[in-house]
Image (cartoon, rainbow, N blue to C red):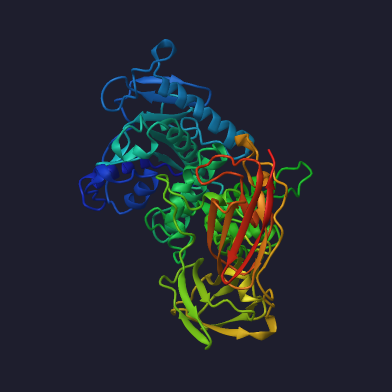
């Protein structure tokens, strides 16, 4: 069949009805749950199980229409589906509709014009005899109260007609966008509903673009949905941040990925496929250089290149690998690097990794999540052997081990012994002790060997061993990890604790709030040869305590300039001290030092 036309819309609508009447997606207590990010995934992953469909059409209860260059926006002024009609613009058009139209046109300009993706398929002229498709080739957007059963949702994109031609399977589509984000489930967006509208439009519009490249088959034996759909959602969430970089809504979904790194990139467990946007972000930043005369960053184009390939390859991992090979690497090498990058987030964020990594993983309610989830290994004097068996044998997954060891000059030897069915790689990474001047980072990707050595354990606050699984065989893969002391990679500790002279001395405390940073503070440098608490005391010349501070469990190393103990010239009450001579005392373990400082205002 050269050209196959199927009205998927009817199937999708029946799916909505079907799912709302069954327990497949039971949402007990939905009023207090988080809203569904994107219903497109929920619908496409379930309609294939249905053997019949209801004869249902696009919403016929949205009589009003607002037309822009590329979109027709349908809405109503009455009932639960109406946007806020107390805030009206010119010609009695709700401001929400006007905002949505401007946002959608910005999404078009960003995704189609600036980034060069295909435009959505025109729903009238693409399909011979198409009816009830909005009247023209503009992309139709229906503003209504979007939900699945009782569960509110941000929006969805509905594929309507499948078009099969020139070796590609594509689909026309329309969007449904939430009408106000006012329900309790959207409380995290209270006061910033417009941001929810922004990211939803960027996300769902990118889905209409997805379907102009490829529509995933859900019919055996050519079912590509399970293998492809993670990439649909991961790249759609990624696109939100490309179009609206300041919103950072994608960060809300990172815990679903970071907390379960042992699951495959393509896992559809919970919100994992939304959190997998971190892989697309990694690709764009890892390849953020300009090999072209036009000075277009490869980071801006590599995701599009993958979609261009997916139009005919119809397999996400294969498409990604083909593009990576074009640029001198491959999926396995890049995935190994990706798993290491995921260690350098949150408090361990380091320059040279994710540009917004200091945000990862942070939740919208402000709770700080741990960095990527790991298992702990305790290592002492004896060799330690850990047997690794992945909880889920799936493609492109990683298990992290954090190795706890005593502070020692010796290095740490890490040996990997994989089973025959283990198809993957190994890595080791060490993160330097926080705040020390020598906060080194060591990353080891063993190539022709299964051994690695971390030099001078005392220099690092965190040491990890990583096992990356690429494509397991039918048998259960496993791997032994052996830890040993390695004298060949020893690094001497500082011989003893020492204290430098404070500077600048004399010291003029800044009176302006903008100047109250370490650049304008009195600094007290020191060196530690063992893990110690360090305290600083400031006294008047007559012995009265003016100020004190304490740092807990600092690692061995040198602490100077921004890493030193600092004093801003204020007393414990936060008031600037008077001019004069003051006595300082620094205590580190059993060592201490005293001296004089002058304050001149």
In the rendered image, the residue lying farthest to the right is 293
Q: Is residue 130 above or below residue 315?
A: above
Q: Residue at x 43, y 35 (%)?
A: 196
Foreground: 559 or 315?
559
Foreground: 112 or 251?
251
> How many numbered discs?
0
Q: Estimate the x, y position of residue 130 in percent, counting from the top left.
A: 41, 32
Q: Estimate the x, y position of residue 85 in percent, counting from the top left.
A: 34, 19
Q: Is residue 190 above or below residue 267?
A: above
571 relative to 492 in the view: left or right: left
Instruction: Note whether residue 127 is visible.
Output: no
Q: Quadrant of residue 482?
A: bottom right
Q: Residue at x 50, y 68 (%)?
A: 398
Foreground: 69 or 135?
69
In the rendered image, the residue lying farthest to the bottom is 382
Q: Estimate the x, y position of residue 474 in percent, counting from the top left.
A: 44, 77
Q: Quadrant of the C terminus?
A: top right
Q: Residue at x 54, y 75 (%)?
A: 423
């Amino acid at each position: 069949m050269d050209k196959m036309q199927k009205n998927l819309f009817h199937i999708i609508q029946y799916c909505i009805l079907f799912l709302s009447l069954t327990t497949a997606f039971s949402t007990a207590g939905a009023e207090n749950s988080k809203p569904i990010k994107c219903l497109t995934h929920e619908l496409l992953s379930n309609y294939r199980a249905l053997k019949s469909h209801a004869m249902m059409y696009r919403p016929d209860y949205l009589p009003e229409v607002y037309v822009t260059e590329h979109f027709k926006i349908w809405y109503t002024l009455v009932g639960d589906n109406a946007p806020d009609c107390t805030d009206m613009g010119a010609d009695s058009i709700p401001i929400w509709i006007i905002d949505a139209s401007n946002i959608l046109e910005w999404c078009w300009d960003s995704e189609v014009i600036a980034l060069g993706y295909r435009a959505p398929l025109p729903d009238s002229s693409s399909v011979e005899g198409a009816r009830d498709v909005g009247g023209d080739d503009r992309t139709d957007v229906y503003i209504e109260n979007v939900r699945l059963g009782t569960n509110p949702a941000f929006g969805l994109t509905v594929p309507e007609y499948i078009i099969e031609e020139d070796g590609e399977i594509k689909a026309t589509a329309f969007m449904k966008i939430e009408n106000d984000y006012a329900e309790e489930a959207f409380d995290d967006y209270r006061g910033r509903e417009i941001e929810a509208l922004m990211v939803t439009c960027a996300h769902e519009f990118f889905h209409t673009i997805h379907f102009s490249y490829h529509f995933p088959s859900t019919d055996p034996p050519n079912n590509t949905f399970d293998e492809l759909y993670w990439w649909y959602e991961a790249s759609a969430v990624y696109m939100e941040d490309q179009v609206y970089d300041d919103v950072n809504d994608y960060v809300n979904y990172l815990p679903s990925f970071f907390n379960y790194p042992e699951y495959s990139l393509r896992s559809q467990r919970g919100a994992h496929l939304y959190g997998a946007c971190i892989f697309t972000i990694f690709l764009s930043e890892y390849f953020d250089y300009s090999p072209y005369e036009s000075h277009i960053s490869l980071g801006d184009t590599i995701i599009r290149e993958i979609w261009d390939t997916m139009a005919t390859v119809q397999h996400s991992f294969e498409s990604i690998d083909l593009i990576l090979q074009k640029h001198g690497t491959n999926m396995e090498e890049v995935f190994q690097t990706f798993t290491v990058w995921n260690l350098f987030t949150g408090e361990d964020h380091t320059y040279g990794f994710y540009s917004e990594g200091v945000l990862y993983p942070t939740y919208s309610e402000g709770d700080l999540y741990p960095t990527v989830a790991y298992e702990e290994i305790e290592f002492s004097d004896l060799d330690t052997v850990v047997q690794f068996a992945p909880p889920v044998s799936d493609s492109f997954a990683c298990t992290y081990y954090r190795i706890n060891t005593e502070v020692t000059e010796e290095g740490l030897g890490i040996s990997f012994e994989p089973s025959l069915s283990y198809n993957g790689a190994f890595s080791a990474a060490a993160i330097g002790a926080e705040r020390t001047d020598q906060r080194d980072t060591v990353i080891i990707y063993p190539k022709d060997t299964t051994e690695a050595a971390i030099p001078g354990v005392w220099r690092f606050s965190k040491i990890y061993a990583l096992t990356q699984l690429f494509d397991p065989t039918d048998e259960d893969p496993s791997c032994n990890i052996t830890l040993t002391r390695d004298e060949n990679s020893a690094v001497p500790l500082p011989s003893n604790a020492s204290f430098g002279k404070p500077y600048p001395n004399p010291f003029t405390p800044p009176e302006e709030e903008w100047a109250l940073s370490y650049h304008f503070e009195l600094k007290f440098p020191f060196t530690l040869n063992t893990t110690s608490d360090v305290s600083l005391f400031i006294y008047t010349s007559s012995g009265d305590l003016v100020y004190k501070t304490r740092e807990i469990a600092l690692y061995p190393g040198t602490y100077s300039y921004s890493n030193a103990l600092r004093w801003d010239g204020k007393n414990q009450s936060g008031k600037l001290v008077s001019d004069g001579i003051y006595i300082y005392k620094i205590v580190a373990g059993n060592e201490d030092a005293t001296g004089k400082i002058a304050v001149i205002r």
